[in-house]
Image: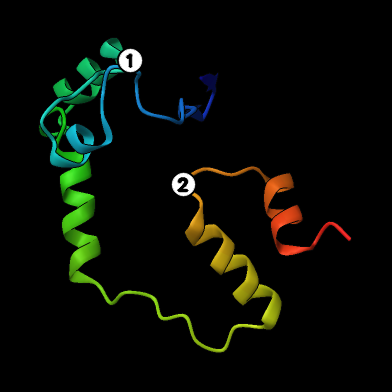
Amino acid sequence: MGMYPDRIELVSLGSLPANLSPAEHLQGQVSVLRNPKLTGVLFRLRYIEQFGTGIQKILAVYEATLQPTVEGLTADEERLLEQMQSYRSYTRNQLDVATGFDN
């Protein structure tokens, strides 16, 4: 987090907390506050309605929008997309090797 005269910058911690499964996260069953003090302030200022509802709102909006189509890709883009769909987690180096882009 950084505080400046005209703004506050927050950094995402990235992955889910160790005690929260992806299913619980997506279903909104559990809310784990990463920064309870900040969350409390935002709640009192009415910037957030309640804790743990953001993912459900994002999913609802996503489902209501058109899904992206994968048309007109180059051969390299198709190879990369194919590899990305076959892995749950990967590094840039792993993708480079798997697609042949490291040559």
Tell me: 28 left or right of 38.
Answer: left
Per the image, the residue denoted by label 2 is: 88
**Label 2, label 1: how many angstroms apart (C-alpha)?**
28 Å
State the scheme by which the image is colored: rainbow
Residue at image position (65%, 42%) is 91
Please tell me in which quadrant of the rendered image residue 36 appears: top left
- Label 2 element class: loop
Q: Position of residue 63 (x, y in %)?
A: 20, 65
* Residue at 26% in and 29% down: 21
The residue tagged 1 is: 35
Q: Is residue 89 left or right of residue 55?
A: right
**Amino acid, disc 1:** Asn
Residue 43 in percent (x, y) is at 16, 24
> SS for tag 1?
loop
Left/right placement of residue 88 relative to residue 64 reads: right
Seen from the viewer's position, the closer of residues 5 and 50 is 50
Using the image, determine if residue 46 lies above or below residue 67: above
Note whether 99 is above or below 22 in the view shown: below
Q: In the image, 94: left or right of 88?
A: right
What amino acid type is highlighted by mark number 2? Arg
Q: Residue at x 58, y 61 (%)?
A: 83
| Residue 49 percent coordinates (x, y) | 11, 34
The vertical placement of 17 against 85, above or below, is above
